[in-house]
Image: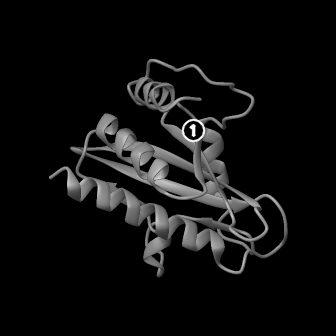
């Protein structure tokens, strides 16, 4: 999917107008919420309010949902071995391949309007294995840093 299509689908979705993506491949917002509620385990990292690890806290950006979706897609495209897969209904799905063994981690982002900003909840999960040696936490940290860098550069 092209960058324009992903941003367009994410923006339309955030505005409640739907989007064009394979509904079988991309989870609904409710499905992402259920995944987030499952919490952290050996090969999964999820955000939760009040987490001791700042990488595992939802992040709020002083941007509209549309601007936030653009910032997320720009951030993902700036990162090596990351790829935006799809976006719809406020959900953005990205993948990241590990450097050495090329394992794929799935990252689901849920963008929720919050007054005059947008909150992002996230889940990063390895497709294989029972332990990720902390990689999924690092994935989220890398993503938050890239998004913040993009947000700061636009101010």
Which residue ends up furthest to the right in the rendered image? 129
Residue plotted at (48% across, 36% down): 90
User: Splitting the image into 4 quarters, where does residue 54 fall?
Assistant: bottom left
| Mark 1 residue crowding within 10 angstroms, few (<14) / some (14–19) / many (20+) | some
Work out whether 95 lies above or below 31.
Answer: below
Image x and y of residue 65, in percent: 33, 38
Secondary structure category for the residue under label 1 = helix
Instruction: Please give left or right for residue 115 compared with residue 5 in the image.
Output: left
Decide if residue 102 is in sight here: yes
The residue tagged 1 is: 29
Residue plotted at (56% across, 66% down): 139
User: Splitting the image into 4 quarters, where does residue 57 fall?
Assistant: bottom left
Image x and y of residue 33, in percent: 59, 48
Work out whether 113 lies above or below 106.
Answer: above
Residue plotted at (48% across, 75% down): 51
Image x and y of residue 56, in percent: 50, 70
């Amino acid at each position: 999917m092209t960058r324009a299509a992903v941003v367009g689908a994410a923006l339309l979705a955030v505005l409640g107008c739907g989007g064009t993506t394979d509904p079988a491949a991309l989870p609904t917002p409710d499905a992402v919420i259920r995944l987030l509620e499952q919490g952290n385990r050996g090969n999964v990292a999820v955000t939760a309010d009040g987490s001791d690890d700042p990488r595992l806290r939802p992040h709020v950006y002083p941007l509209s949902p549309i601007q936030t979706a653009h910032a997320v897609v720009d951030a993902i495209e700036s990162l090596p071995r990351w790829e935006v897969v799809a976006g719809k209904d406020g959900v953005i799905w990205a993948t990241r391949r590990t450097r050495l063994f090329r394992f794929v981690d799935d990252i689901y982002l849920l963008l929720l309007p919050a007054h005059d900003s947008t909150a992002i909840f996230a889940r990063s999960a390895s497709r294989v294995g029972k332990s990720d040696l902390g990689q999924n936490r690092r994935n989220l940290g890398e993503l938050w840093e890239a998004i913040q860098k993009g947000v700061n550069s636009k101010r």
